[in-house]
Image (cartoon, helix red, strand yellow):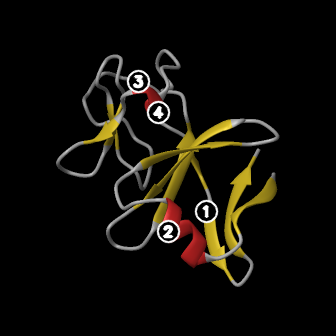
């Protein structure tokens, strides 16, 4: 796994990514398309822009539901953002979460 810097500073990241926005990021290496999410509590989450069920892109209509889970636009499966577990009882594989780190060198994402 390798770390990729997405924003040089936290201020840059906060200026570009609104709270609750599913922000699509293109990477130079797999998984290539990632969703970055800034939560109201100041934490950040990241995951591949593909539902684990049928690979539908979250960036094409995915959203956060009332309890803060990300919902797939195709079949409306919901995923908890701390663990990636599917919460609608559909036996869908979990959504792999990618580590996000905020430090003096900006906001970084660990990819596989």
Image quadrant in which you'd find residue 7: bottom right
Select label 2 or label 3 by which is in front: 2
Tell me where residue 17 appears, x and y as whole percent: 47, 59
| Nearer-N-terminus badge (2/3) | 2
Reading the image, the residue beneath label 1 is: 100
The disc at residue 10 is: none
Give the numbered dot on residue 59.
4
Label 1 crowd bin: few (<14), some (14–19), many (20+), radius 10 Å: many
User: Closer to us: mark 4 or mark 2?
Assistant: 2
Which label's residue is closer to the chain start, 4 or 3?
A: 4
Q: Residues within 10 Å of mark 3 (few under 14, many from 20)?
A: some
Task: Measure the C-alpha gap from mark 4 to mark 3.
Answer: 19 Å
The answer to which of marks 1 and 2 sits earlier in the sequence is 2
Among numbered discs 4 and 1, the one appearing first in the sequence: 4
Sequence-wise, the earlier of marks 4 and 2 is: 2
- Tag shown at residue 92: 3
Q: Label 2 belongs to which residue?
A: 15
* Residue 59 image position (x, y, % from top left): 47, 33
């Amino acid at each position: 796994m390798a770390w990729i810097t997405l924003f040089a500073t936290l201020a840059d990241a906060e200026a570009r990514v609104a709270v609750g926005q599913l922000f699509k990021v293109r990477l130079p290496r797999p998984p290539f398309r990632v969703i970055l999410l800034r939560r109201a509590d100041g934490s950040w989450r990241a995951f591949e822009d593909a539902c684990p069920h049928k690979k539908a892109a979250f960036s094409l209509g995915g959203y956060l539901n009332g309890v803060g889970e990300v919902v797939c636009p195709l079949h409306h499966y919901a995923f908890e953002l701390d663990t990636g577990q599917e919460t609608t009882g559909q036996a869908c594989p979990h959504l792999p979460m990618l580590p996000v780190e905020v430090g003096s060198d900006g906001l970084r994402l660990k990819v596989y």
